[in-house]
Amino acid sequence: MAAGGGSPSIVEFFGGEDGYRCGYCRSDTGNLSHGMWAHSMTVQDYQDLIDRGWRRSGKYVYKPIMNQTCCPQYTIRCQALHFQASKSHKKVLKKMLKFLSKGDVSKVATEEEPMDSHTEDAAASDFPYKSESHVSQSELTPLAVDHSERVQNEEEDSGEAKQEVKVQQVGSDPLQICSDKDAPGPGEPSHSAKVVHAPPKPGKGADLSKPLCRKAKDIRKERKLQKLLQNQKCPLEGSQLPGGDQAFLLQNSKPRANQPKSVEDFVLVSLPEDARHKLEVRVVRSSPPSSQFKATLQESYQVYKRYQMVIHKDPPDKPTINQFTRFLCDSPLEAEHAPNGPECGYGSFHQQYWLDGKIIAVGVIDILPYCVSSVYLYYDPDFSFLSLGVYSALREIAFTRQLHEKAPDLCFYYMGFYIHSCPKMRYKGQYRPSDLLCPETYVWTPIEQCLPLLENSKYSRFNQDEKAVDEGHVKELGRVRVLHKRTVMPYSVYKKRRKGPSDEANVQQYASLVGQTCSERMLLFRS
């Protein structure tokens, strides 16, 4: 990524937390994770961290201890450029169109609404209050570099960061989706992690290396077309095909496959002039907060508060706006812009859904070098009947494809964690094609190959190559970058200066979890 240099990431590593309550199986102490407080973080570092199984909740970044935690959480990504909506997805899209056009949708939540959407981090919302850092800002400002590579503090190429608002309206001009040739296909790497892709055994799911199955009706049509074309080549000049067949030929003789409708065909369709409702989607930068974000903060908070009270049964005095801000607005990610990046830049954003001038839902997202990462979704419970969890996920996939036009490397949609041991959280596997991250070697594996393994054991290594290891593992602990007394230095220098008991085991654990690359780029704060 060509984003500007800016400041380095600065983190405080807390090590393995004591067990805490699990939001999935309700175990009081079974949820185990490693955690660190991110004072600041570059988007490239966070991209590399989520490709090693980390995830953020506010400024707290955590990684489940996969072989010990009660409900293993596997990072899942959807290959957005190859995504095709299922029948149930299209039902949700059609329902929204019907509601906007006629306003007469049955107000009953449908079966295709899984849980209430991206709720896997509801259990993580206590992290920031439990593990917040108390280090002063002055201690975090590096003044010197000691025996290590100089910290680069380049000015941003584009000058002052833009605080743009992108507006997508249902009924606006259709998106022009770029060719897939610039982006990784189903079995290609995502720049920051490898992919293993072998055809599954019979009965173990679809082989994504083969074309999608087609309807018998479409195959019959194609055969008929081929026959008609052959007949047309016979030496009966001037003969006319029957009217219906002629129209069929004209319609289907173009050199394109009979593609099913895409998400964009539904969300960017023109509505009738007398449409009952108007929906627009605005993307506003949440960190650092743009003027548009500040202007809508109170309204957004009220939607979240109602959502928590109705969906998660929170008492009226919880959550406070301070809790809301720390959980869903604060972010360690630095705003970055790059010449070959999206116009809105990289970093943390709120995707606001405005219905008739009122916020009805907000998707919290991070825009990273290779993906759009979904953080959380909350919505007005009065509009549960619109299946906003599914609808927002489909819009975020379409948004990923839109960003890909300007930023060719950005082609994945990360949905957080897939939790097979919790049946209500399996819905994320329905956004195909998708991959799960191997918890031991950090390679991406098509979900069809993972599901049989997860049926046998809730914790599983997906990489079937027994000799494969984590290629990002720490090779030289002394090269880990440390921030100590406002001076940047390699761990080998800090170790000699440190007084008191050795912290090598703690630093070794940190480095093994973040990987060699991040450990040499990020600054590990030591008091």
Image: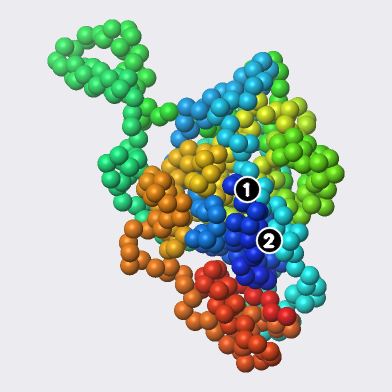
Q: Earlier in the sequence, mark 1 or mark 2?
A: 1
Task: Bin the neighbour count of mark 1 within 10 Å (Cα to Cα): few under 14, some 14-19, many 20 and up.
Answer: few
In contact (CB < 8 Å): disc 1 and disc 2: no
Kind of residue at disc 1: Arg
**Can residue 449 be seen at all in this image of the molecule?**
yes
Q: Residue at x 62, y 92 (%)?
A: 496
What secondary structure is found at the residue carrying circle 2? Answer: strand
Q: Residue at coordinates 66% horizontally, 70% vertically from top-left?
A: 14
Q: Which residue is mark 1?
A: 26
Q: Is residue 43 left or right of residue 468?
A: right
Looking at the rendered structure, the secondary structure element under dot 1 is: loop
Quadrant assignment for the C terminus: bottom right
Give the x, y percent position of residue 380.
74, 33
**Amino acid at circle 2:** Tyr
State how many labels appear.
Answer: 2
Q: Which mark is residue 39?
A: none
- Give the foreground label among 1 and 2: 1
Residue 69 horizontal/vertical position (percent): 55, 58
Asked whether residue 340 appears in the rendered view, the answer is: no
Residue ID for mark 2:
60
In three-dimensional space, the C-alpha distance between marks 1 and 2, rounded to whole angstroms, equals 22 Å
Q: Nearer the viewer, residue 503 or 157?
A: 503
Residue 54 position, x and y percent, is: 57, 60
- Report the front residue among 231 and 215: 215
Q: 423 or 220, which is in the foreground? A: 423
Image quadrant assignment for residue 194:
bottom left
- Where 472 falls versus 448 (above or below)? below
Q: Is 442 placed above or below 257 here?
A: below
- The residue drawn where x is 67% and y is 20% is 107
Mark 2 closeness class: few <14, some 14–19, many ≥20 residues within 10 Å: many
